[in-house]
C-alpha cells in the first residue's frame, strides 16, 4: 500500500533536504577542518594519494591533481569521486577513511593549489 | 670573523678536499669494493643516501635528483653506478663510490622506473607520459632507442612492469591497451617488437629469476597474464584466473609491486589484488597450491634470499604492519610493527638482515631476520625505496 504523504513526513523530508543542502552551502564558503586533522589530510593527499597521482600531484597512474585541471571541474563531482571512487579505474573510494566535509576541504585545497606539508 | 669569511673558505675547501681525494694524499680513503653498498631514496627531498649493509650506516648523501616519488634504481654490473629513475622523467647516474652525480638527463614527463640489459650496456626507462620505453647508452646516457607504446588503435598507453630478458630483450606491459610487448634491443638501432594480448589493466609485472616467465598482474580482472619468453610464440596464458571467485575486490589504496623476489623453493608468492591474501603458485604447473591469509592487502611480497621466509608489507591505511610467512609451514609466523608507513623492504645480499623504510617516522630500520628484532636505525627524510648493489647480478632487477 502506498502511504499517503502526511504533513509531519513532509516536514521531515524538508528537514532532510535542508540537511543535504547544508554541506553544499558550507562548501560555498569554506569547510572548517581543525588544524591537526588538516595536517593529516595534507600528508595523506601528498604521500598516499601521491602514490598514484605523484608527490607533486602532477600525475602518475592516476591523472594530475593540479589546480589548473581542478578548476575546470565541478566540486561536487570531485567530492563524489573521492568518497565513492571511480568504478572501472584504480581510483578507490575513501569514504570510511575521510568524511564528506573533509573531502570537500580537500577539493577546495586542490582547486586553490594544494598546500605543501 | 666577518660574515663573508666562512662562505669564501667553504668555496675553497671543497675543491681542495676533492683534489686531495683524487691525489690520494694521506687523508684519502683506502680503495674499496661496492658489494655491501646500496642507496636509500629520500623521496620528498629528491636525494639518495649511500648506505653500507655491513656497518649498517649511511655513508653519504647525493641531492639534486628531482621528484623521487615512486623512484626506482638499477645498478651497473660493476656495482659502482646507481641509475635512479625519478617520477619526473629524470634519469640520474649516481657514482656511489664518490657519492656524486656522474650524469643526469630528463628523458620524459612522467616515468615509473627502469631496467638494465643483460650485458649492462643499455639502461631502459619505462614512461607514463609520453607512454613508451626509451633505451640509453649506460655509459653516456645518450638515447639509442625510443619505442612509443601506441597500440593498433593509435592510443598511447602508460607502460608498467618493464623487465630485462636474455639477449638484451625487454618485456613490458601497456596499462590501457592490456598488452605485453617484448622488445629485442640486441641491435638497438633497429629494435624488433612482438606484441601479445594480456588482459585488462596490467599494473606491474615480474620475470622469474631464470628470466623465463614474464608475469603481469591484472588490475581489471581476477588473474595474471604469463608469457613463456623461451617460447613466446605460444602466446599469453592466464594463470590464477578467477582467484577472487567473482567476489567484489576491496578498495585498493596502493598497487602491489611484482618482481622476481617472490619466487622461492619452486613456488611463487603473489599479492592478491583487493584481497587480504598471498597466493601461492607452483612454478612448474602454474596452478594455485595455497592461499595464505594476511593482515591486509599486500604490496611487497618478498622472499628472503634463501627462500625460507616471505616478508609482506601492506597498503595504506595498514602500512605500519609487516608479516613474515614461513615457507615450510605455509603460514604467517610473525606480525611486526617496525614503524609508521613501511613503504619498502630490501634484504641484505644473503638475507641475514632486512632493511625497512618507515616513511612517516623518517627512518630506515634494520631487522635481524633470525631474531625478528631491530638491530640498527638510520635517519632518513621520508624514505621509500631501498636498493642494494647485489641487484646488479640478478635478472629482473
Image (tube, rainbow, N blue to C red):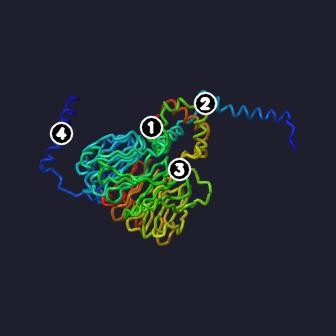
Point out which mark residue A58 bears.
Answer: 1
**Residue B128 or residue B62, whichever sits in front:** B128
User: Secondary structure beneath disc 4?
Assistant: helix
User: Secondary structure beneath disc 3?
Assistant: loop
| Label 4 Cα neighbours within 10 Å, binned few <14 / some 14-19 / many ≥20 | few
Point out which mark residue B267 bears.
Answer: none
User: Secondary structure beneath disc 2?
Assistant: helix
Q: Whole-Å distance between the Cαs marked 1 and 2?
A: 25 Å
**In what quadrant of the picture does the C terminus of chain A appear?**
top left
Q: Whole-Å distance between the Cαs marked 3 and 2?
A: 27 Å
For the residues labelled 1 and 4, say whether their Cβ atoms are less than 8 Å apart.
no
For the residues labelled 3 and 2, say whether their Cβ atoms are less than 8 Å apart.
no
| Label 3 Cα neighbours within 10 Å, binned few <14 / some 14-19 / many ≥20 | some
Q: Nearer the viewer, mark 4 or mark 2?
A: 2
Answer with mark 3 or mark 4, whichever residue precedes in sequence: 4
Q: Nearer the viewer, mark 1 or mark 4?
A: 1
Residue where numbered disc 2 is placed: A27
Q: Whole-Å distance between the Cαs marked 4 and 2?
A: 56 Å
Residue where numbered disc 3 is placed: B317
Whether residue B83 appears in this view of the structure is yes
Q: Nearer the viewer, mark 3 or mark 4?
A: 3
Q: Is B303 rendered above or below residue B25? A: below
Amino acid at each position: 500500500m502506498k502511504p499517503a504523504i502526511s504533513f509531519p513526513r513532509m516536514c521531515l523530508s524538508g528537514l532532510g533536504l535542508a540537511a543535504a543542502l547544508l554541506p553544499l552551502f558550507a562548501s560555498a564558503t569554506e569547510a572548517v577542518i581543525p588544524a591537526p586533522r588538516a595536517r593529516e589530510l595534507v600528508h595523506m593527499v601528498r604521500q598516499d594519494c601521491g602514490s598514484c597521482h605523484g608527490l607533486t600531484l602532477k600525475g602518475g597512474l592516476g591523472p594530475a591533481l593540479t589546480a589548473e585541471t581542478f578548476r575546470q571541474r565541478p566540486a561536487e563531482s570531485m567530492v563524489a569521486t573521492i568518497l565513492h571512487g571511480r568504478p572501472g579505474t584504480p581510483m578507490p573510494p575513501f569514504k570510511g577513511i575521510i568524511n564528506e566535509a573533509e573531502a570537500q576541504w580537500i577539493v577546495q585545497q586542490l582547486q586553490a593549489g594544494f598546500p605543501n606539508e | 670573523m666577518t660574515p663573508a669569511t666562512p662562505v669564501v673558505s667553504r668555496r675553497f675547501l671543497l675543491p681542495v678536499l676533492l683534489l686531495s681525494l683524487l691525489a690520494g694524499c694521506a687523508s684519502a680513503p683506502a680503495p674499496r669494493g661496492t658489494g655491501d653498498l646500496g642507496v636509500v631514496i629520500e623521496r620528498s627531498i629528491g636525494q639518495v643516501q649511500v648506505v653500507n649493509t655491513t656497518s649498517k650506516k649511511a655513508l653519504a648523501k647525493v641531492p639534486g635528483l628531482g621528484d623521487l616519488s615512486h623512484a626506482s634504481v638499477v645498478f651497473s654490473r660493476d656495482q659502482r653506478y646507481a641509475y635512479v629513475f625519478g617520477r619526473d622523467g629524470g634519469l640520474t647516474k649516481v657514482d656511489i663510490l664518490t657519492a656524486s652525480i656522474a650524469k643526469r638527463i630528463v628523458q620524459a614527463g612522467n616515468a615509473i622506473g627502469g631496467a638494465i640489459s643483460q650485458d649492462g650496456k643499455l639502461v631502459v626507462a619505462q614512461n607514463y607520459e609520453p607512454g613508451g620505453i626509451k633505451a640509453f647508452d649506460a655509459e653516456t646516457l645518450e638515447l639509442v632507442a625510443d619505442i612509443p607504446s601506441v597500440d593498433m588503435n593509435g592510443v598511447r598507453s602508460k607502460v608498467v612492469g618493464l623487465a630485462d630478458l636474455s639477449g638484451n630483450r625487454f618485456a613490458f606491459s601497456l596499462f590501457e591497451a592490456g598488452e605485453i610487448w617484448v622488445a629485442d634491443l640486441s641491435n638497438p638501432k633497429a629494435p624488433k617488437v612482438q606484441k601479445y594480448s594480456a588482459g585488462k589493466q596490467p599494473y606491474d609485472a615480474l620475470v622469474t629469476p631464470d628470466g623465463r616467465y614474464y608475469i603481469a598482474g591484472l588490475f581489471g580482472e581476477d588473474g595474471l597474464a604469463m608469457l613463456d619468453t623461451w617460447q613466446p610464440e605460444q602466446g599469453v596464458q592466464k594463470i590464477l584466473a578467477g582467484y577472487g571467485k567473482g567476489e567484489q575486490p576491496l578498495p585498493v589504496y596502493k598497487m602491489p609491486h611484482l618482481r622476481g623476489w617472490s619466487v622461492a623453493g619452486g613456488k611463487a608468492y603473489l599479492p592478491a589484488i583487493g584481497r587480504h591474501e598471498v597466493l601461492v603458485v607452483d612454478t612448474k604447473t602454474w596452478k594455485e597450491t595455497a592461499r595464505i591469509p594476511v593482515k591486509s592487502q599486500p604490496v611487497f611480497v618478498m622472499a628472503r634470499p634463501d627462500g625460507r621466509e616471505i616478508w609482506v608489507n601492506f597498503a595504506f591505511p595498514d602500512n605500519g604492519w609487516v608479516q613474515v610467512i614461513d615457507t615450510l609451514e605455509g603460514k604467517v609466523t610473525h606480525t611486526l610493527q617496525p614503524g609508521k608507513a613501511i613503504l619498502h623492504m630490501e634484504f641484505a645480499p644473503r638475507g641475514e638482515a632486512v632493511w625497512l623504510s618507515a616513511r612517516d617516522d623518517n627512518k630506515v630500520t634494520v631487522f635481524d631476520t633470525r631474531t625478528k628484532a631491530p638491530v640498527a636505525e638510520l635517519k632518513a627524510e621520508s624514505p621509500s625505496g631501498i636498493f642494494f648493489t647485489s641487484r646488479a647480478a640478478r635478472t629482473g632487477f
